[in-house]
Image (cartoon, helix red, strand yellow):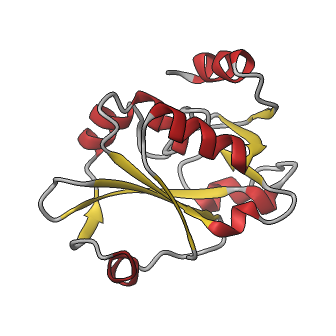
Amino acid sequence: MDKTAIYAYFKSQDINYEPVEHAAVYNMEEMSQIDLPHPEADAKNIFVRDDKKANYYLITVKGDKRINLKEFRKQHGLRNLSFASEQDLMDILGLIPGAVTPLGMLNDETCKVQFYLDRDFLDEPGLIGIHPNDNTATVYLQTADLVTIVKNHGNTVEIVEI
């Protein structure tokens, strides 16, 4: 699904969202240079795989947090983790680097990606800002709606402390 298809999907599911178009951004530093309406809700997303290339994970945290992959792996009983390749990102989620987003899981035809979401996104007002499969926009929606979207698609969702 591209950005237009994501917006159409939201409308068909009666999901409230607030899209914000902007210049392409490729990391959180570039994102911080853009005047966005809800910077406290902006998400940082990393796409990783285990050392056997058997399991893939999308980890989404508040934009100001850092993720220690060794600690994360230990906390969740996972094998050694490393960043997935650009090719895996495209083949599995249909995304390019800089456009990683939980909405990419709608392109995950075999539902092989497991989603780990930072529990802090559930705190009031419960808003999350993510790319709509395109790094030239950020879309704000309720975190609960995002969780429902991912679960309904068939991917597993874990809400975790990070």
Q: Nearer the viewer, residue 109 or 39?
A: 109
Q: Is residue 74 above or below residue 104?
A: below
Residue under the image location 76 percent in, 57 percent down: 41
140 to the left or right of 99: right
Q: Quadrant of residue 97?
A: top left
* 83 on left or right of 34: left
Which residue occupies 53% across, 21% down? 2
Q: Residue at x 25, y 49 (%)?
A: 85
Image spot of residue 11 (x, y percent): 74, 18
**Looking at the picture, does residue 12 appear above or below residue 91?**
above
| x, y percent for residue 162 | 55, 76
Report the number of numbered marks.
0
Q: Position of residue 65 (x, y in %)?
A: 61, 74
Please determine whether, in this image, residue 52 is positioned above or below residue 108.
below
The correct choice, above or below, for 50 with respect to 24 in the image is below
136 or 62: nearer the eye? 62
Q: Residue at x 61, y 60 (%)?
A: 28
- Which sits in the foreground, 74 or 152? 152
Image quarter of residue 77: bottom left
Residue 125's spot in the image, x, y percent?
A: 87, 58
